[in-house]
Amino acid sequence: MEDGDEEMLRLMRASALKPQDAAFTRRVLGALPPRQYVGSSTRLSLVATTRFAIAMVLLAVAQHWFQTGPGGFESMVVLLLALGPAVMAVSLVCGPLIPRSVRRLVWRSGREWR
Amino acid sequence: MLIARVVQSDDRRAFSMLVQRHQGMVRGFLRRMLGGSADLADDLAQESFIKAHRHLRKFRGGSTFAAWLCAIAANELRAEWRRRRRRAEFSDEEWFDAPRIAEPGLQRDIATGLARLPEAQRAALVLCFEHGLTHEEAATALECPLGTLKSHVARGKASLREWLEE
């Protein structure tokens, strides 16, 4: 490399813009989305387990309905009432449990969650 | 390793150290490319770091983290230029920034000389010589073939030398 080049590159390095301050770091951290305390693998397995549990509960309810007929209504209400808070709690931690494609089949909501 | 801590447990302290370590390069690069517009450069730098945080899981280590980060910043810059071009199509607004450097002596000449270069040459020179990226890293950051990058560097250097010798 020529001497002129060396001098020019030395000047470029010397005049480089490298702004650095703690305020910018704080600004970036402040703009990040809220921290997810549950790891992604934990979240996925929790979602899968809960979906499986929901399917099992629905199956049990259906079987109960089939065996006892309308007379077993109270027990089904109790089961379904217990299911609600469980689904809500897991949804809060992990996001919607019921995939959007399935939700669309069941009901049409004007609101998109993700 | 800081990146692993951020990916595994969303460690904000580790991410803040990454921001501290690389903000000089990202903000400096964007300021040079935007002709010294510090506020806009910092907005784009912030957006670049947020995107880096969101996609850090996709960083495979095929290039250095600095090159990967610069690629995100360069994409943000291109998006900003596209927005400006669109705005300029509907008004008489200039979509580029005229050099607004007011530094004394030779530094002013370097800054002004850089600002007069075509964008690709300026980006190549700033990344390679101001921020010390290798040619391979700069090519990754600017998403161009290595040969093209080297040609931008050579042409940029020649133009800058000419400007300084005027």
Image (cartoon, helix red, strand yellow):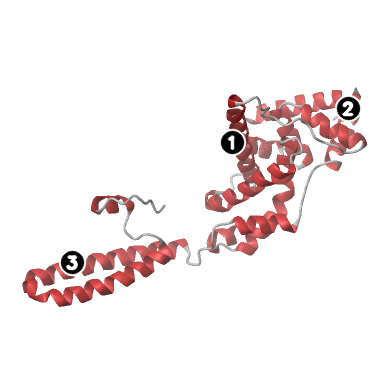
Crowding at mark 3 (Cα within 10 Å: few <14, some 14-19, many 20+): few
Secondary structure at badge 2 equals helix
Where is residue B49 drawn, in percent x and y?
62, 50
Chain containing mark 3: A
Residue topped by disc 2: B164
Nearest-to-viewer mark from 2 and 1: 1
Quarter holding the C terminus of chain B is top right
Distance, label 2 to label 1, CA atoms, is 32 Å
Secondary structure at badge 3 equals helix
Instruction: Choose between A29 and A111: the one closer to the eye.
Output: A111
Q: Which circle marks residue B87 in the picture? A: none
Where is residue B18 drawn, in percent x and y?
67, 56
Distance, label 3 to label 2, CA atoms, is 80 Å
Q: Are the two marked residues, 3 and 1, in contact with CB atoms closer than 8 angstroms? A: no
Residue topped by disc 1: B79
Asked if badge 3 and badge 1 are on a common chain, one would say no
